[in-house]
Image (cartoon, rainbow, N blue to C red):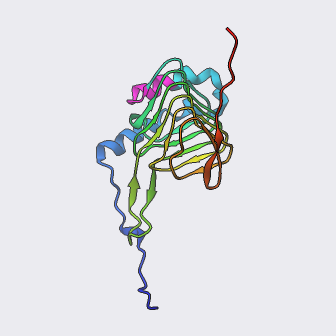
Amino acid sequence: MHRTVMSIDTTKCRSPWSTKVKLARLVWSAFSPLFWSFWGRRGSTLRVAALRLFGAKIGSPSLVCGGVKVWMPWNLVMGNACSLGVGVEVYNFAPISIDDQTTVSQYSYLCSASHDYTHPHMTLIMFPISIGKGVWICAGSFIGPKVVLGDGCVIGACSVVTKSMPEWTVCAGNPCRPLKPRIMQEIPV
C-alpha cells in the first residue's frame, strides 16, 4: 500500500473573522473581570447584563456563575430559568442555543468549533449546538459541534458528547451513549 505524505502548515491558516468581529471580541474581553470566580453567584445579574449588552439573548431568571467564559456573546441564546455553573466554557464560534429550564453544571465545555484535520492548514470549522428544554449537563462534560440534546436529556458527569442524544434519556460515557429512560417522579398535588 502506497501512502502519500502530506505536509501540514498551520502558519497558512487564516482567521475567518472580520475586523469588526475581532474588535468586538477585544472590547468584550474588557468585561472579563465580571466573570471572575470571586464574584460568585452574586455577580450573576451583572454577568447576564454584560452578555445581553453584547448581543446574547437570555431569558429570566437565569444564572451565570463566576468563572464562566463566553467567547462570543452574540452567538448565545439561553431560555428562561437556565444556569451556567462555575467555570463553564462556552466556545461559541457558531451559535449555541440552550432552551428553558436547562442546567449546564460546573466545568463543562460547550465547543462549537474544531479544526479540519484533513486540510493542510488545519482550517477552523464551526457548527451550532442545540440544547433542549429541561436538560441537565452534569459536571465536567464536553459537548461538541453539531450536537443536539433532546428535551429532558441528562448527560452524566465527565461525558464526551460528539453525537446527538435523544430526549428524556440518561446518557453518559466517553463516548457518550444513551443508558436508560429519564422517568420523572409524580409529585402529589
Q: x, y percentage for residue 117?
A: 44, 67
Q: Quadrant of residue 168?
A: top right
Query: Taking 125 as reference, is 138 left or right?
Result: right
Q: Write the start and end of the magenta stretch as one range.
A: 48-57
In this rendered view, identify the residue nearer to me: 46 or 156: 156
- Relative depth, front residue between 143 and 69: 143
Q: Is residue 8 above or below residue 184?
A: below
Seen at 65% across and 37% down, the residue is: 106
Determine the main secondary structure of the stretch shown in magenta.
helix
Above or below residue 44? Residue 104 is below
Residue 86: within the magenta?
no
Q: Is residue 64 above or below residue 165?
A: above
Figure quadrant of residue 141:
top right
Q: Observer-nearest residue: 157 or 140?
A: 157
Q: Percent position (x, y) of residue 17?
A: 33, 50
Residue at the (45%, 52%) spot, across then down: 113
Relative vertical location of residue 56 with respect to residue 173 in this rendering, above or below = above
Q: Nearer the viewer, residue 159 or 122?
A: 159
Q: Where does the image place residue 164, in percent across and percent down from the top left?
A: 50, 47
Query: The C terminus lies in which quarter of the figure?
Result: top right
Q: In the displayed structure, does residue 4 sit left or right of residue 20? A: right
- In the shown orientation, is residue 100 left or right of residue 67? left
Please tell me which residue is depicted at 44% across the width and 91% down the height of the picture. Answer: 2
